[in-house]
Structure formats: structure tokens, C-alpha cells
Amino acid sequence: MADDRLIAALDVPTRGEAEALVARLGDSVAYYKVGMELFYACGGDIVMWLKEQGKKVFLDLKLHDIPNTTAQGLCSLLRLRPDILNVHTAGGLRMMRAAADALHAAAEERGAACPKLIGVTVLTSMDTGDWAGLGHAGTIEDAVLRRARLAREAGLDGVVASPQETALIRRTCGADFLVVTPGIRPAGASRDDQRRVTTPAEAVRAGASHIVVGRAIYAAEDPRAAAEQVLREMEEI
Ligand code: C5P
């Protein structure tokens, strides 16, 4: 039933709500994303609890700092045994390379499985107006592709990108590169604050290795039914 390609975002403020949501979703979801809201509220315990439940975890903390701080920060997260960690590609090639090298070395030294390391390209909530407002001259698409190439060059395992850029990244970075796509809205759902959105089926068709779904599942009246609908839409292709 569960499909590793679906990652449900646990964007809730307390451990109690996270546990209740995981219980409601049961075996329909095998992969969870723990982001800033939950991690800052209850720390690494929630990640270890999810791992004890047999779930996979994408720890989405989007590290963005100088190379040494980012690299050491990632290594401090290794003890939680996440399956995916991420940095922000805006930190540049040297930062991403330091992060990947340090993570691989630390995992080897500890005899631990190395989590996949992916880079956030451009947030899916950004539109062309937001982008231009930051002073960027080129298009978002060009920036996403450039950042995906840099991530691959730095030794990262993949990127987070909008489904609208997924096909291009898949063609450019190859079949093994992870492309994790948030900004997913099942047919007919609200866009909320997201701008570059698409449906589960379109994301998978474009070549996404994983889709991240937040509000469309956790804010649904029946989260399990919502997750099952997403799974059906993914299989439609
Ligand atoms: O509720 P919704 O499905 O829009 O949530 C998307 C999730 O994916 C959020 O947890 C958000 O932090 C995350 N995300 C994103 N865009 C990125 C990276 C992560 O929306 N580029």
C-alpha cells in the first residue's frame, strides 16, 4: 500500500499532533518530512520516534551557512538516522561540496548509513515577481537548472525543485539524481501560499523521484483518504 515516492509533511506544531497524524495515516504513508516547525518545537526526538515506527524521514532543515558551519551542522544530525537531509544551494558550490564530503566522511567513521543529501534550488513559493524583487536578472527556471547542476557537481544526491522544473532537471542531471518536488496539489485543491504547483500525476510524469505533500494531506478532513487519493493519482500515469 505505502509508496516511498510519497513524502507526507508533518508540518504541525507539537509532538502530540504529529503522533496523532501518523496514527491516522497508518500504513498509507511510509515516508515523512520533518521541517522547521516540528523540529524546532520538539527536537530530534520526533525523528527517532518516527524511525522506531519503521518510517523513513526527510529532515528538511534547509541548512544555509558558511561551508564549515553547514558541514558540521549536518554531521550533528547524523545521530538521528534521517534518510534525507538538505542544504540550500544558494550557499554555493564550495558550501555544498564541504557538506557532502563531511557527511560522507562522518557516516563512514561512525559506520552509519549515509543519508541522501539534497539541495533546495528555489523555493516553490517564489514567483517571478518575488524573484525579480531580489535583484535576479535571469529566470527562475535558469537559476533552478544552474543550481541543480552545481549540486550534482558538488556531490549531492539530488535537489528539491518545483514540479514545473522537474523534467528539465531529470533530463540534465540523469536518472539517478533525486528530484523531490513540493508544491503538489491534487486536482481541485487550494494553492495556499504556493505559486509553482502541479498535481501528483504531473509531478511523477515529469520525473519526480519523490513528491512532498503537506496541507493537502494534514489539513484534510480525512487525512488518510487524502493520502490514498494522492497515491491513486500517482499511479494513474
Ligand atoms: O502544504 P504544502 O504541501 O504546500 O507544503 C510543502 C512543504 O514542502 C512545506 O513543508 C515546505 O516547507 C516544503 N518545501 C517547499 N518548497 C521548497 C522546499 C520545501 O514548499 N522548495
Image (spheres, grey):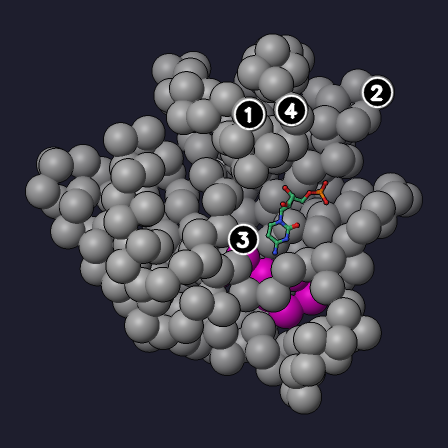
Q: Earlier in the sequence, mark 4 or mark 3?
A: 4
Tell me how far mark 4 sits from mark 1, CA to CA.
Answer: 6 Å
Q: Is residue 123 above or below residue 34?
A: below
Give neighbour class at mark 2: few <14, some 14-19, many 20+ (Cα, 10 Å): few
Q: Which residue is mark 4?
A: 13
Q: Position of residue 6 (x, y in %)?
A: 58, 38
Image quarter hosting the N terminus? top right
Q: Secondary structure at mark 3?
A: strand
Task: Tell me which segment is drawn in magenta.
Answer: 159-166
Q: Residue at x 60, y 33 (%)?
A: 37
Circles 4 and 1 in contact, beta carbons < 8 Å? yes
Q: Position of residue 15 (x, y in %)?
A: 56, 16
Q: Is residue 26 above or below residue 203?
A: above
Residue 41: mark: 1
Q: Is 67 positioned to the left or the right of 108 in the image? A: right
Q: Position of residue 204 (x, y in %)?
A: 62, 54
Q: Which residue is mark 2?
A: 221
Q: Amino acid at mark 2?
A: Glu
Tell me how far mark 4 sits from mark 2, CA to CA.
Answer: 18 Å
The total of numbered circles placed on residues is: 4
Q: Residue at x 61, y 18 (%)?
A: 14
Q: Is residue 203 magenta?
A: no
Q: Is residue 22 above or below residue 7?
A: above
